[in-house]
Image (tube, rainbow, N blue to C red):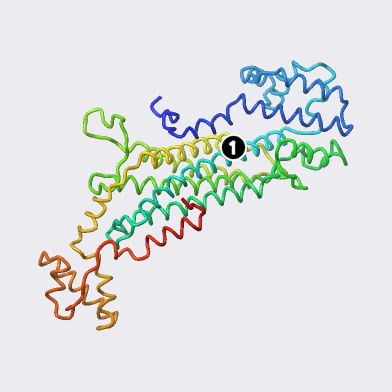
Amino acid sequence: MLDDRSLHDPAGTRAVVAASFAPKAVLARIIRFEVTLAQVQAELGVIPADAAGAIARAAAGWDPDPGAVAAERAQVGHPMVAILEAFGQGIGPEGREWLHFGTTTADVFRTVATQQLHDVAAQFDAALQAIGLRMADLARTHRATPMIGRTLGRHALPISFGYKVSVWLSELERDRARLADWRARFSGAGVLSGAVGTHAAMGPRGRQVEAAVMERLGLGAPDPVDSKGALDIFAEFGAVVAIMVRGVQRVAQEIFLMQGDDIGELSIRNHDVGSSTMPHKVNPTLCIEIMSRAPEVSATLSVLLTWVVTMHERDSALHFGALEQMCTDAAQVLSCADGLLDRLVVHPGTMRANIDRTQGAIYTESVTVALADRLGRRSAHELMRQIVARMGTGGLTLAQALAAEPRCSGVTLPDADSAMGEAPALVDACLERLGYRG
């Protein structure tokens, strides 16, 4: 009750992904597998045509009932047998005899899980694309909005806010690329090859049945050798998701820090009650949700890596529940990121004011470069270290300290707009390279 994750789903991504793992949806996929198998087998003369017809007719009128399956499982103790018994009650005797012929539980569950992950990957890509559009708009709008760049938590040099967002966007596009690579490499990860993968039940026709069933289920050509005991594809998917959510977490953390009262460069439109005792508080709820949920998602990767080490041809150490939770929570992270960027407010005035907090010390690199022609880089660098020390002890601005140093005569200070280097042009180049042309 106190951690209802469905409450934080501004883009609806979590709800869509969760629906694909709902028990009724999973049962529907399993029965579609069985119907498709029977139809292909009938066409190839493996089972009688009237048996396939009876199975298909039963499926057309079957409303998946998780309760009925649970009741059967309590009796038989096997998940696949329970599903077959619950569904088989509505099939005529001519079809019931041939239901699930030539396949095994692992074939069905592996193929259904593969279908689910391909669907989830498509949803993730759509969510990342929506987030990317928001980032691209921010980067374009603020391509030349100066702010302080921070390294190791300290003021470094001016950048533009658009440049910062472009870095976020580049990372996000790599997430999309990793997802696309997984989808392409494992399009044929469905399997229908029997108990140990040798097509022993259907013989020479087994491979033909497998290929046709996978094609009709929307999957690619299966691997010639059985892969039910090789679960690396799930671990790789988990690795891609773990990297993705951690990248989103980094963005949320940056926003969390920048919107704090002590920096104030960003704010988030949020009308929620922030505190039960302090009426002035408006909390960065979506930031917090992302920052707390992403580590939980990435922690699941260790479970999936453990899953890779199976015994012999396969065992039953399956973690589909962990994979389901990982996908659903990752969808929530993406949904919150979309909502966060939608509600983000940028404060250019505060960004510019924060640039001046060091009294000009952030421009010492620029002055060092200018002095290098006179003194050499090393000597110029040491002189600027001394000048910064004088600023601290004398309460001087950099301009005042430079004016008091004869070796710096004629040196002028840049302003924030000219000191951020090629940042605006780099934003333009990034957007062009990634295909965000306005």
The residue located at (26%, 61%) in the rendering is 416
Q: Nearer the viewer, residue 411 or 314?
A: 411
Give the x, y percent position of residue 318. Answer: 62, 37
Q: Nearer the viewer, residue 196 or 330?
A: 330
At 21% from the left and 30% from the top, the residue drawn is 279
Quarter of the image for residue 319 reads: top right
Q: Position of residue 139 (x, y in %)?
A: 40, 52
Query: Is residue 308 or residue 161 the one in the foreground?
Result: 161
Viewer-side residue, 44 vs 91: 44
Mark 1 residue type: His
388 vs 128, left or right, is left
Question: At 69% from the left edge and 37% from the top edge, which residue is drawn?
Answer: 111
Q: Is residue 278 left or right of residue 327?
A: left
Q: Residue 296: percent from the left, percent from the top?
A: 45, 40
Answer few, some or many: residues within 10 Å of disc 1's Cα (few below 14, many 20 plus, some between 14 and 19): some
Q: Is residue 273 above or below residue 402?
A: above
- Residue at the disc numbered 1: 319
Furthest-front residue in this view: 438
Coordinates of residue 324 in the picture (x, y in percent): 56, 35
Can you say whether 248 is above or below 281 in the image?
below
* Left/right of residue 335 with respect to residue 265 in the rendered view: right
Q: Classify mark 1: helix, strand or loop.
A: loop
The N terminus - image quarter:
top left
State whether residue 238 is above or below residue 158: above
